[in-house]
Amino acid sequence: MAKYILGIDIGTSGTKAMLLTTDGQVVAQKKDNYSFVTPHPGWAEANADDWLNAVTSVIRTLAAHVADEDIVAIGIDGLYGGSGIPVDKDGAALGPALIWMDRRALKETERVKRLVSDAELMQTTANLADPYYGYTKVMWLKENKPDLYKQTVQFLPPESYVIEQLTGKTSINYSAAGNLAGVFDINKDEWSTELATKLGLDIDKLPSDFVESTEVAGEITEEWASRLGLKAGTPMFNTGVDVGPATVGTGILEPGKVTVALGTSMNAALVTKQPLRDNGLIIWPYAYKPKDYYYNFAGANTAGAIVAWFVKEFADEFDEDDGPKELDDRSSNLPVGSNGLLVLPYFMGERSPLWDSYVRGTILGVSLKTTKYELYNAFQEAISYSVRQSIEQFGTEIGESITLVGGISQSKKMVQMIADVTGKTVLTTKSGGEANLGSAILAGIGIKAIDPSDVSNWIKIDERIAPDMTKHERYNEYFTMYKQAYNSVKGFYQDFSTIQHD
């Protein structure tokens, strides 16, 4: 009789789940949407209840397809939750998480730079100081929400919070700990008491039960089992920050290949045996074999997010699902450069490789003849330039092809544009590259229902899109101007921020 695994991905704007057999056949999928809030410019918060409600809803729906006892494992990952959810002694949420997109911890970042040298931070954590990282956000909470900080027993990443609710067990994946950065010693795979002391953070407010993605983090309680249609004791696997399992979902269980995940944000990643320090990258232990492999990535805070924003604000005659497809069709014949437009896609500041909290989205070259279709095309070109700038951080490690996954990979126009801008052959996968698939694979390896050597057979390359080298030569000129445009405006935005008020 067939056995089944649930793979769940708690995303920034929705939770996706997949029910599949232990030999990789997808039975059913489900998604629940929600939103995050931006109460001030540069702020981004999400609520634990949205995550828990979405996860339990998708489990309940998918579990109804099979007998309770036939679901043998659940793998669950989450967006980078930044500060994490502050919880009290009973595990109840005390407030929202300041998620990865939140850039408010500017003063705290400057304080880190005064307290700890870049060399020490890089050597210990393989990362530096920036409002992106969770430890600077926790410092902000301590400074600005002292009562909340004092009441907080632990700060839990999204997947850790949900697992604790459903199993009663606390855990943190090595990738989530590494992405908190600042106070995680990547050389010893443990919290750094020395750095936490220097930064004034309480190490006991961070989960101490580190787990790998392939070891059981907890088992579903009897109460939740009856509510969700599962067998009590079903093992849950904490698979960490979503882009790690998404990379596993492309079949990568060893170093060497570049994967670009394009969803709400963009992550361009390379798995290595040693951290690629001093390259402006974000680095943490990989989702698979975290003590042997490292996940090195650059990326954009807003990729798919700016497409969704454009549809909402400038093309509201289309709904959010059909809008990008319609706009793709109507802008498909525009020339390289969108008839003289250039967009900087930094709508929420930018992380690696620019590390700039002040810069904002910028549209250059607008005239009275500019159409919304040209603007839309320029937005897509901006995302493509961002991909190129990110993968170039890997130097000679790139190779001649990249694997593209995520929602934007469904746009044939976007895939071709990324190939043209980067000059690389772009591979897309069929039923691959989704974080929920990667989480299911990791859970399956954990219960020994899946042989790691078979995983690559699950991932089918859907298409190989070669670049148009004539367009690539033209895009080389625009990419040079793209980088020059940022250098021209970054000083302006730093000055401009001094007169901004909430």
Image (cartoon, rainbow, N blue to C red):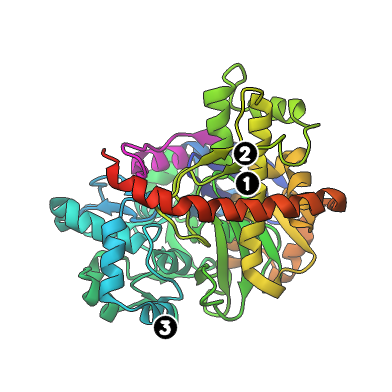
Q: Which residues are magenta?
A: 31-56
Residue 187 x %, y %? 44, 83
Q: Nearer the viewer, mark 1 or mark 3?
A: 1
User: Is 192 located above or below residue 398 in the figure?
Assistant: below
Element type where label 3 sits in the image: loop
Q: Residue at x 34, y 54 (%)?
A: 84
Which residue, given by chain and number where applicable, does mark 1 sit on?
383
Q: Residue at x 67, y 49 (%)?
A: 384
* Image-quadrant location for residue 296: bottom right
The reply to whether callout 3 and callout 2 are in contact (CB within 8 Å) is no
**CA distance for labels 3 and 2:** 42 Å
**CA distance for labels 1 and 2:** 6 Å
Mark drawn on residue 176: none
Which residue, given by chain and number where applicable, does mark 3 sit on?
188
* Image-quadrant location for residue 379: top right
Residue 463 x %, y %? 83, 49
The C terminus appears in which quarter of the rendering?
top left
State the residue in front, 397 or 251: 397
Q: Residue at x 66, y 65 (%)?
A: 392
Element type where label 2 sits in the image: helix
**CA distance for labels 1 and 3:** 36 Å
**Amino acid type at mark 1:** Ile
Mark drawn on residue 379: 2
Residue 424 x %, y %? 78, 58
**10 Å crowding of disc 1: few (<14), some (14-19), many (20+):** many
Query: Is residue 170 located in the magenta-colored stretch of the structure?
Result: no
Element type where label 1 sits in the image: helix
The reply to whether callout 1 and callout 2 are in contact (CB within 8 Å) is yes
* Image-quadrant location for residue 438: bottom right
Q: Does residue 358 appear in this view?
A: no
